[in-house]
Image (tube, helix red, strand yellow):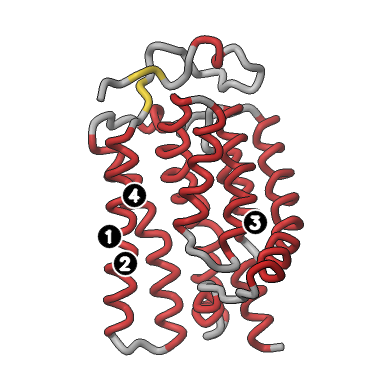
Amino acid sequence: MSQVPFNHPQESRKPGAAASFRPNQVPRPGWPEIIVGLTVFGAVARGGVLLAGQLGLDPVVYGLALAALSVIAPFAGFGAAVLLRIRSLHAFSVRRVSRRWLLIGVGAGVVTFVVKGFAVMAYTALTGDSSTPQDVFGDGGSGGVLSLILSTLFIGLLVPLVEELLFRGVITNALLRYGPLIGVVGSTLIFALAHGINTVFPVALVFGLISAEMFRRSGSVWPGIIAHVINNLPTVFVLVLIRTA
């Protein structure tokens, strides 16, 4: 598949576009990057879970191992996508953005953090499903101060970084060539499904829409990363509190 510019000329004139963007100079990832990125991500995630399950690990160690895997798998997918053809972080929208967009990212993170509780309640009421795969991260953070710090580092800081690189920097980026609807909604569905059909799904759906739209308008992954950090940072602490309540 031939490489095309990151944005069409008319998109570059939008007020939120990054100052460093110059159309017709920076290639955009495409289907090869999407396929390779998701394949590597899925293979590493699945293989890591199977391996960790066979080792008979202590619950705290197992939780930390899966938290670390949650960082490794999307990072491996992103790295494979970058190395496939383009080999330029700038092409994957790792580019500077205005302070205004960073503040918008903060606001989006706060809004998502508030809204996600209602999204989970609506999902549970409609489906009767209250299962969540995130309880294991509470196990990982319940082994004392060090385990709490490590689990929070993985889930609260590193996961937002690598997930935004893969799902926005690669997937939203590539799908935007087909227009805003497919780029934003399509990548959001992929992002939500990657988290499984459980109580995390509606949260990923809400956040994915917000992050993908910020990405489309700003031309950078950084607003989404900031919003994602704000959304994820309290997760492990809250899960540990629930366990001890």
Q: Position of residue 193 (x, y in %)?
A: 48, 56
x 76%, y 57%: residue = 114
How far apart marks 2 and 4 lie (CA) works out to 12 Å
Viewer-closest of 203 and 97 = 203
- Identify the mark nearer the N-term, 2 or 4: 4
For mark 2, what is the residue?
A: 46
Point out the frontmost of discs 3 and 1: 1
Q: Amino acid at mark 3?
A: Asn
Tag 2's secondary structure? helix
x 59%, y 21%: residue = 17
Residue 43 numbered mark, or none: 1
Point out the frontmost of discs 4 and 3: 4
Residue 231 numbered mark, or none: 3
Point out the frontmost of discs 3 and 2: 2
Q: Amino acid at mark 4?
A: Leu
Residues at marks 1 and 4 touching, judged by CB atoms closer than 8 Å = no
- Identify the mark nearer the N-term, 1 or 4: 4
Residues at marks 4 and 3 touching, judged by CB atoms closer than 8 Å = no
In the rendered view, would you say 199 is above or below 222? below
Residue 38 numbered mark, or none: 4
x 31%, y 38%: residue = 33
Quadrant housing residue 103: top right
Q: Amino acid at mark 2?
A: Arg
- Identify the mark nearer the N-term, 4 or 3: 4
How far apart marks 3 and 2 lie (CA) works out to 25 Å
- Identify the mark nearer the N-term, 3 or 2: 2
Viewer-closest of 164 and 152 = 164
Q: Position of residue 206 (x, y in %)?
A: 64, 50
Binning the other alpha carbons within 10 Å of mark 3 as few (below 14), some (14 to 19) or many (20 upward) gives many
Q: Which image quarter is the C terminus in?
A: bottom right
Q: How many marks?
A: 4
Q: Position of residue 138 (x, y in %)?
A: 56, 78
